[in-house]
Amino acid sequence: MLDEYEAEELELDDDERELLATLSPEEQKQLTALGESRRDFLGKMSATGTAILAAQMLAHEQAMAFSVGEVSSAETSVAADALTVKMRLNGAEKIVQVEPRVTLLDALREKMDLTGTKKGCDHGQCGACTVIVNGRRVLSCLTLAATCEGQDITTIEGLAKGDQLHAMQAAFIKHDGFQCGYCTPGQICSAVALMSEAKNGEASYVTTNLRSTPRDLKLSDDEIRERMSGNLCRCGAYPNIVAAIREVHTGKSVDEAQAWSFAGEEKKDETV
Amino acid sequence: MRPFSYTRATEANAAAKQVSADKGAKFLAGGTNLLDLMKEGVENPSALVDISRLTLAQIKTTSRGVSIGALGKNSDTANHPLIRKNYPLLTQAILAGASAQLRNMATNGGNLMQRTRCPYFYDVAMPCNKREPGTGCGALEGINRMHAVFGWSEKCVAVYPSDMSIALAALDAVVKVKDASGAERSIAFADFHRLPGDRPEIDNNLRPGELITAIEIPKNNFAGNSYYLKVRDRASYAFALVSVAAALEMNGKKIKTARIAMGGVAHKPWRAFEAEKMLAGKEATEANFKQAAEAEMRNAKPLEHNKFKVELGNRGIVRALQMAMNGGAA
């Protein structure tokens, strides 16, 4: 419904200009700021009879993160402060136009049709938005898209080769490493990057002998848990996630029966 | 998030000039803390100057020790062979903080610039002298379990959150900074962060527009006997209740020099000078460790909900010293 406004310029006619003049300085500030109370403001605008202007502004803001390049070459109004960012995304060159405050996460999901990367907390605490930039796992919710110029980005959509799943994806399925699945893309991207960190000999807080720097680390389950602590799973699929990662890490099939057990059974075993 | 302008700096002096000329401008490096604060409306810069592409990431040996570039990533710094071999305490402290993803993003200079995670600072509906001077301190008589036991004031009881900085404080690091004119100066680590006093809105002694370029750590003989202990509510990925960076240089059975810094207890990395003095020349026994810890912690002034931090600090110092004696991070 907003599309019809996209091609229109954000220009005011005389009536609208007059209405605008009746706004308090604070409201005018909000208009120029398009700040956090945008919704309130749009509400006020609608109430004062300038619904069209409000809708234009909304369309305008949406267009701020409009992607161009291969996606579309449509003539679209783009924010005056939009930046053109060129990046390598899952192996292909992409160009996107974003307002400075658009995060990589929002650019991926809203404008580049890659909704595999999930928005969990949006504050860098849950890991659901984990993607791989230049081979390193990072949080896309705390990365501004504008800073990604020239970077090589891999999302969950870029891991499989056609119909052939990445080994980590296959292992997550085999070991039932999820329940609702919302954290899974972040878990898998994180785990894939973890494999190369272990190969490079990178340490964690639970690593001993920090002064020597061997490569090709063999990670214990404690190591895997510590290194995956930035990815939360509120369904509690952790034992299965660890099993999936251990299988890919060791290259050996992990006995599925070992991957999980009921707390009661565990206790019984201990007392035997 | 409020709108802001974005520019990518290509030269350090120009970036410093841009930020010093514009009161609303801020440097953007890893962005892991700044962006979060912007989403919360705690920080509202009108301009971000992206310094992440400046060539300030190098880690190299110098005549005095090692120099760590301000824009080196935390993960790269922790895993650099020079750091792991000669300053494993720093490696351990960095790896105790945040998550792998955040350490891949966060820079060394940015780590020093982290702001407190005090919930009253984060919640813009709450009073906070650090966020909005003059509004009062919500934590002073509020929920202050996570707050300071040393050096706080009636204006602010927040603690400084970095782990990396606690190790740097123990290692007597030096912060190298540059201003808009290109002039450089060095700030001893103990003088970099400040106590809240009457101006809790000021976290450190950087002047407006000054850019951290590097952190220098002097040579030391602590590598074989150092340890970073972090005590937290969860096993991983949580801020410290109390943390202790301990480093010992031995002379036979006796302690030649002891360095102890604490996190989670003050508005800045807290050097346990009392404990250090007590240990110099003594044998590394549990009794001596306990005596040193008590000498430090008896000056603590806990708040309503964090009295446990005094005993935790006592035990934390003893445990960290014991771990350091047993080879610690080495």
Image (tube, coloured by chain):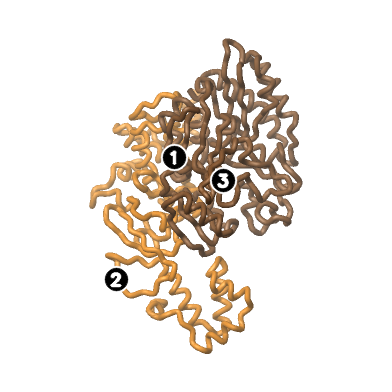
Chain colours: A orange, B brown
What residue does disc 1 label?
A228
Q: Nearer the viewer, mark 1 or mark 2?
A: 2
The chain carrying label 3 is B
Q: Residue B167's spot in the image, x, y percent?
A: 56, 32
Discs 1, 2 touching: Cβ within 8 Å: no
Instruction: Name the residue: 30% across, 54% down.
Output: A88
In this rendered view, identify the residue nearer to me: B67 or A181.
B67
Instruction: Name the residue: 63% across, 76% down.
Output: A25
Of labels 1 and 2, earlier in sequence is 2
The chain carrying label 2 is A
At label 3, the amino acid type is: Gln
Q: Classify residue A59 as left or right of residue B226.
A: left
Q: CA distance from mark 3 to mark 1?
A: 23 Å
Q: Would residue B224 be visible to someone looking at this image?
A: yes
Q: Residue furthest bottom?
A: A14
Q: Residue A213's spot in the image, x, y percent?
A: 39, 27
Label 2 SS:
loop
The chain carrying label 1 is A
Q: Residue B160's spot in the image, x, y percent?
A: 62, 42
Q: Nearer the viewer, mark 3 or mark 1?
A: 3
Q: CA distance from mark 1 to mark 2?
A: 41 Å
Label 3 SS:
loop
Q: Classify residue A128 as left or right of residue B288.
A: left
At label 1, the amino acid type is: Met
Q: CA distance from mark 3 to mark 2?
A: 42 Å
Q: Residues within 10 Å of mark 3 (few under 14, many from 20)?
A: some
Q: Residue B314's spot in the image, x, y percent?
A: 68, 27
What residue does disc 3 label?
B114
Q: Which numbered disc covers residue A73? A: 2
At label 2, the amino acid type is: Ser
In this rendered view, identify the residue nearer to me: B83 or A129.
B83
